[in-house]
């Protein structure tokens, strides 16, 4: 058996062992606002519920290992004392992942991820409309666990209002675990889906993805493409050039046939096939070929 003294290995390696061994971990999709009223949205898998009376949720935005800086969510929670914790189900997992991209301060991750901000009732941060359960919270306390990169910060939140999508309830008004279809975080790129096993979501680009807000209107409002599809499309740092699109189409008789039919739905279905195989640039080339 491999035995390790945490003090004798690099923090990134220790971090990997911890995340690989402790899971699946629920995801706190945390919405905050800064002192200027600008929204921020980011997921955290160091999270759980710890009390029902009072109702207490705790999540932990850790200090960045690479440069020992703190995350906007932590800064906002400390400054305003309010946060909304949204749960993550399979329908929004790709958009949630895209929102974890480290966009600059003041960039609205709701817009980048293509998720809908709705007003809360007791706190100022917005809720994620697409999340099946949303918890409006007051921040009771922030406990700092260290001052170096990788150190956690326990954000202790008291739930003051809950919102539950009725579609996930059973006939007795209880949350149906099949209907809510929650996902949880594993190690590496892996996630766990209730009753469906593990699946992989590639980490967002180290460079900034263009975001769902930069996707052309007719694609973003497709009757075929899902929120998860849009999340994948938004996680590219640049669109294929016109030459790249033309070369792609010229090499595929099948693509030419779909385009000649002048049927947008068929084009979007073909793009979705590529997205299901995580061939995102090919999907983009198909979609851009009709514009």
Image (cartoon, helix red, strand yellow):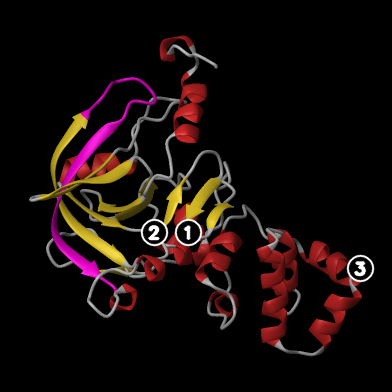
Q: Which structural element holds mark 3? A: loop
Q: Are marks 1 and 2 in contact (CB under 8 Å)?
A: yes
Q: Is residue 215 left or right of residue 171?
A: right
Mark 2 is surrounded, within 10 Å at the Cα level, by few (under 14), some (14 to 19) or many (20 or more) other residues, namely many
Q: Are marks 3 and 1 in contact (CB under 8 Å)?
A: no
Q: Which structural element holds mark 2? A: loop
Q: Nearer the viewer, residue 220 or 105?
A: 220
Q: Which mark is residue 182?
A: none
Q: Is residue 159 magenta?
A: yes
Does residue 291 show up?
A: no
Q: Which residues are magenta?
A: 144-165
Q: Which structural element holds mark 1? A: helix
Does residue 184 show up?
A: yes
Mark 1 is surrounded, within 10 Å at the Cα level, by few (under 14), some (14 to 19) or many (20 or more) other residues, namely some
Q: Residue at x 37, y 49 (%)?
A: 26
Earlier-in-chain disc, 3 versus 2: 2
Task: Give the quadrant of residue 235.
Answer: bottom right
Earlier-in-chain disc, 1 versus 2: 2
Instruction: Give the number of the mark in front: 3 or 2.
Output: 2
Question: Pointer 2: what residue?
Answer: 88
Question: Pointer 1: what residue?
Answer: 93
Q: Residue at x 31, y 43 (%)?
A: 47
Instruction: From the top left corner, tell me how far across and down residue 88 is, in percent.
Output: 39, 59
Q: Nearer the viewer, residue 140 or 109?
A: 140
Q: For the residues marked 3 and 2, what is the alpha-carbon distance in whole angstroms?
A: 40 Å
221, above or below 156, in the image: below
Instruction: Give the number of the mark in front: 3 or 1.
Output: 1
Question: Pointer 3: what residue?
Answer: 251
């Amino acid at each position: 058996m491999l035995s390790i003294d945490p003090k004798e290995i690099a923090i990134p390696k220790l971090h990997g062992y911890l995340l690989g061994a402790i899971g699946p971990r629920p995801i706190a999709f945390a919405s905050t606002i800064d002192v200027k009223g600008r929204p921020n949205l980011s997921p955290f898998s160091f999270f759980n519920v710890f009390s029902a009376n009072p109702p207490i949720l705790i999540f932990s935005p850790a200090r960045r290992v690479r440069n020992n800086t703190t995350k906007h969510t932590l800064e906002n929670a400390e400054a305003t004392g309010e946060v909304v914790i949204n749960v993550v189900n399979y329908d929004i997992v790709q958009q949630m992942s895209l929102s974890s991209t480290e966009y600059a301060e003041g960039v609205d991750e709701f817009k980048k991820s293509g998720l809908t901000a709705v007003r809360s009732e007791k706190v100022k941060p917005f809720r994620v409309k697409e999340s099946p359960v949303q918890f409006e919270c007051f921040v009771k306390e922030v406990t700092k666990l260290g001052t170096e990169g990788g150190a956690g910060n326990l954000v202790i939140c008291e739930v003051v209002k809950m919102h539950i999508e009725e579609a996930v309830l059973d006939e007795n008004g209880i949350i149906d675990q099949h209907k809510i279809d929650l996902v949880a975080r594993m190690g590496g790129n892996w996630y766990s889906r209730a009753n469906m096993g593990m699946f992989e979501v590639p980490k967002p680009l180290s460079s900034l993805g263009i975001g769902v807000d930069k996707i052309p209107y007719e694609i973003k409002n497709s009757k075929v493409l899902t929120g998860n599809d849009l999340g994948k499309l938004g996680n590219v740092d640049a669109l294929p050039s016109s030459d790249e699109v033309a070369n792609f189409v010229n090499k595929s008789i099948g693509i030419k046939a779909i385009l000649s039919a002048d049927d947008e739905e068929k084009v979007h279905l073909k793009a979705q096939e590529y997205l299901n195989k995580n061939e995102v640039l090919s999907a983009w080339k198909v979609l851009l070929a009709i514009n």
